[in-house]
Amino acid sequence: MLKETKVVNVSAGQGSIPEDIIESVLNQNDIVDTVSKYVHLTKQGKYMKGLCPFHSEKTPSFTVTPDRQIFYCYGCGKGGNAIKFRMEIEGLSFPEAVRTMAEESHIPLGEWQGRDSAHHQSPEVGRLLEAHELSAKLYHFLLKNTEHGKEAMDYLRSRGINDKMIDQFQIGYAPNRWDTLVQFLEKRGFDLGEMEKGGLLSARQEGSGYVDRFRDRVMFPIANRNGQVIAFAGRIMGEGQPKYLNSPESRLFNKSRTLYNLNLAKTSIRKLRQSVLFEGYGDVISAWEAGVQNGVASMGTSLTENHALMLKGICDEVIICYDGDSAGQAAAMKSLPILEQAGLHVKIAVISGGLDPDDFIRRHGSDRFVHGVIESAVSPVKFKLIYLKKNHILLEEDGRISYSREALKIIAPLASPTEREVYLRELASEVKVDYETLKQECNLMRQSMLKKQQVGDNNDNSWNNGRHKKVRVPAPNLLPAYHVAERRLLSWMLQDEEAARYVEEHLGDAFNIDDHAAIAAYLYAYYAQGKPPDTSRFISSLQDDRLEKTVSSISMMDTPGGWDHQTLDDYIREVRKMPVQQEIDRKREEMIAAERSGDFLRAAQIASEIIALERQ
């Protein structure tokens, strides 16, 4: 044997996820429809092309193949089927993506509800999820059933949060002690170092050991979209900083990929195709009780592109409902372009008096909040004009002039003449200037803007304004003959079960590239289960990011559909030549070394072995 035989342990199953659910999800989620919600695609022959959503580029290298139901980017190398696309674009695990897409397509999940994903979890993740769930129950119990929680309970009720809301959102209390949670977790056999890494505990600043991270705070459990507790937010009841203390980022918790209350709100969001975006946990809870049950909030941080894409996956419109003060309005202005770039229709709820949503509901009631704030949300242009107007004194002539000039900069870029006219007439009434005069000035400004606007894709700003790291696409390298041969064989094997059986019989796992050997082994197992050739479904059986990308890349090859045994034999021969050639090269080096050391007898023996190999 010239090389060791590769042993690849494969299983084409999906662990706890029934295959019929995966089949149904792929059948009802066409790759073009799935991708088109996020990427503008244009038809080029048998492919669809667009700008990659995963890296910044000016020339489209993102390709969708409808007949094989896969996507692949030649720039960054990402590829896969519709499920993989949703995983990548929304930061979901495989079970989360399957469950989400099944619910959207009204596919019954039966006994499997997408929560039993232990097959896809590391043991550490499983332990952390269990610890977070137990911690949430402990904090909730301490709030409702002990003297420690009495002050916190009084505080919550003073904020208008009743027992029903406390139970609904599993609100709790962390007592003002250093070791309540430490002892609780230690008695249950959890490794405290692991719990510290998971964000539940803190290491002592002096000496060894651990202390509770949260002390004397009202506790809001933060769940992932499947309802599993992955972090906490602790609110101080009196004066002090920080007002909110969030869990640190961990194996479970990523702030930029987590929205508070999405697990409870997603059903309503999908039904209404609309989400309400709040700043705080209390706002979400109060709004829920007021009847707004499609509300979510970001995790004490600015809204991110990932948050926007998560919402884009389940709704078409987002209403921003931030605090009515200047800080809240400034935050709304920052969130606007992020949501719009994700392709969402955006409105902004305007709250008077500088109140936050929670305060507004308690002061004015649910009906006024729903009808006067949420349902009366304004367009981004209207909000920008309202926001701008506050910086000018319209009672003064200079104030009206400066406001009108800045307002025209907002109105002039609007593509719709009707929209421009509506806002210009409102502006004319506000600044007491003739409409035709404002219209003329707006048209001049618009002409100037159009002249300055660069045509085509030649400006320095990438399509997504730096949302993703720019990927420098390397010049294509010529692959060795054996590498090309292996990819050709796999391409035919993906398209034809008979080709796969022939290669299995005459080559087996003797591929030179480990990933190719693994893919071949998975294909043999896939066909052994009686499944038909289907690249998209085969990719779902892999559950390995690198192999999925490789299969997607191979599937994009322009391999002729027809094949014969002679063609396969030629490629198999090329694959088998490689280890022999490597052995010849190694022996030549040995022969040279033997000659240099004066061992001519050994050199002659090696030369004879080289000749035998070359004949082979």
Image (cartoon, rainbow, N blue to C red):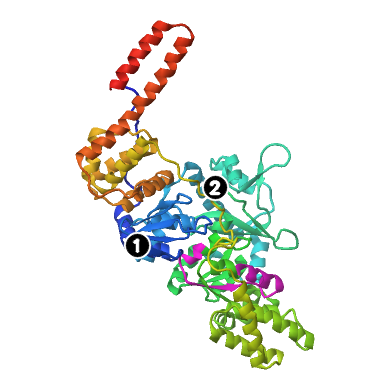
Per the image, the residue denoted by label 2 is 251
Left or right: where 170 falls relative to 564 = right
Per the image, the residue denoted by label 1 is 30
Q: Earlier in the sequence, mark 1 or mark 2?
A: 1
Considering only vertical position in the picture, is 80 above or below 268? above
Q: Amino acid at mark 2?
A: Arg
Q: Nearer the viewer, mark 1 or mark 2?
A: 1
Element type at mark 2: loop
Considering only vertical position in the picture, is 357 above or below 511? below
Pinpoint residue 568: horizontal percent, then vertical percent. Answer: 24, 39
Residue 528 appears in the figure: no
- Give how far apart the Cα atoms at labels 1 and 2 are: 32 Å
The image quadrant that residue 197 belongs to is top right
How crowded pointer 1 is (Cα within 10 Å; few <14, some 14-19, many 20+) is rated as some
Image quadrant holding the N terminus, namely: top left
Left or right: where 457 falls relative to 46 = right
Residue range corresponding to the magenta coloring: 309-335
How crowded pointer 2 is (Cα within 10 Å; few <14, some 14-19, many 20+) is rated as few
Write the residue at 20% across / 42% down. Answer: 564
